[in-house]
Image (tube, grey):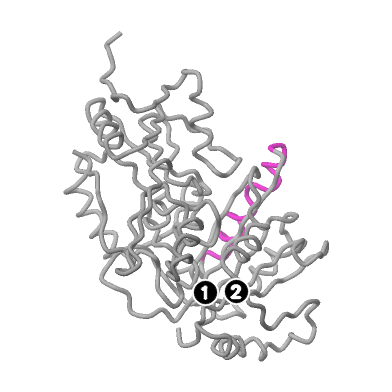
Amino acid sequence: MQDRPTIGETRHYFRGDDGYEQARSQTVWNARTPQRYPEVVVQAVDVDDVVATVRYAQQCDMRIGVRSGGHSWAGNHVRDGGVLLDVSRLDQCTIDADAAVAVVGPGMGGSILAARLAEQDLFFPVGHCTGVCIGGYLLQGGYGWNSRILGPACESVLGLDVVTADGERRVELQIVASRAVPGAGLDTPGIVMASPVFADTEQEADQALALLETCPVRDSAIVAVPYAPADLDTWYSAVMTNYPTGYRYATDNMWTSAPIDELMPGIRSILETMPPHPAHFLWLNWGPSPQRQDMAYSLEDETYIALYSVWKDAADDQTYGDWARSGMAAMEHLQTGTQLADENLGERPAPFATADAMARLDRVRSVYDPDGRFHSWMGRV
């Protein structure tokens, strides 16, 4: 047997080694770990480890999948064969409060970064869920807290260290429907409208939230809290009731500008067939979007709709596993594209960037990764 090139002192596990399966499965936050098996899993702790891994893959003619936080619902980074590079341990963080600049590693958790910034009265639009790390989050655009106003997080990036292959009102309106709302003490189906406002004063927050007072069904609400001061920790706690750890997930989503009367038949079907909590339907008012910088990151539109099927028992995979995909597929004629953060491209290919943006990305990839060393997206169209 020909000797393999070495990966140096970097901790790694070849398929068949003790610890391989734990190293592979722990890269996926979704308990529904994909049945795909890389040849080797590398757990990098610094940039030198990353460099050594890429060089190893080049010598062995292997492709590379990269994981930072592992919150890709589809487990995009886990592929058959090749190298799975886990950079979750590159989680360093330094903050220059005077310059309002933070230098962070790809494995830095967004919620942890937010807490450290808040200690110095600073803010960055990190992801909505705990555990989402900066690396993958930024590569998918970065739709996070207050991004409707501040823009996707990638617009706030000043620079990157790269290892190559050789809104008028300050309101973010979220509507979540599920079979139960445990946070409100409800075991019956419910629709929650939540609107985090980022404001400098309570008066400013009151003015922004006045929009919700115009809701025509407000008087029918089981619970109505017009204004409650809160911090990001509180919001994270509320959000994560819909995303418990150790569960199995299947997701899909769409951007759309279709009128509500065209969307409602599909939405009714989705709500009628929704699995038990914590499975849920998310509606997010997004547009009109401001002019973005000259960059390629995703598509945007007036409305974002996402489905999350969440269940505990693997025996229910056939029962609940296709609800999100089939729900979005039935409304596909109304979509303008999909968002990478909650994508299901491997099972339902959909456009996620404009044709011009994809062409530019391909040109960049052809220069920096001419041999296709790093995996592309599953189900690209």
- What residue did someone put label 2 on? 263
Residue at the spot 61% in from the left edge and 48% down from the top edge: 249
* Viewer-proximal residue among 21 and 335: 21
* Viewer-proximal residue among 49 and 80: 49
Residue at the spot 71% in from the left edge and 45% down from the top edge: 319
User: Residue 264's spot in the image, x, y percent?
Assistant: 64, 74
* Viewer-proximal residue among 4 and 116: 116
Q: In the rendered view of the protein, which quadrant contains the N terminus?
A: top left
Considering the whole magenta stretch, tell me its main secondary structure. helix
Residue at the spot 55% in from the left edge and 57% down from the top edge: 252
Q: In which quarter of the image is residue 54?
A: top left
In magenta segment, residue 307: no
| Mark 1 surroundings within 10 Å by alpha-carbon count, few (fewer than 14), some (14 through 19), many (20 or more) | some
User: Residue 5's spot in the image, x, y percent?
Assistant: 25, 20
Marks 1 and 2, the one that precedes in the sequence: 2
- The Cα–Cα distance between marks 1 and 2, rounded to whole angstroms, is 11 Å
Q: Which amino acid does label 2 sit on?
A: Leu
Q: In this view, does 249 lie to the left or right of 302?
A: right
Viewer-side label of 1, 2: 1
In this rendering, the answer to whether 28 lies above or below 9 is below
User: Residue 119's spot in the image, x, y percent?
Assistant: 48, 65
- What residue did someone put label 1 on? 303
Magenta span of residues: 314-332
Q: In this view, does 329 lie to the left or right of 46?
A: right
Q: Which amino acid does label 1 sit on?
A: Thr
* Viewer-proximal residue among 291 and 229: 229
| Mark 2 surroundings within 10 Å by alpha-carbon count, few (fewer than 14), some (14 through 19), many (20 or more) | some
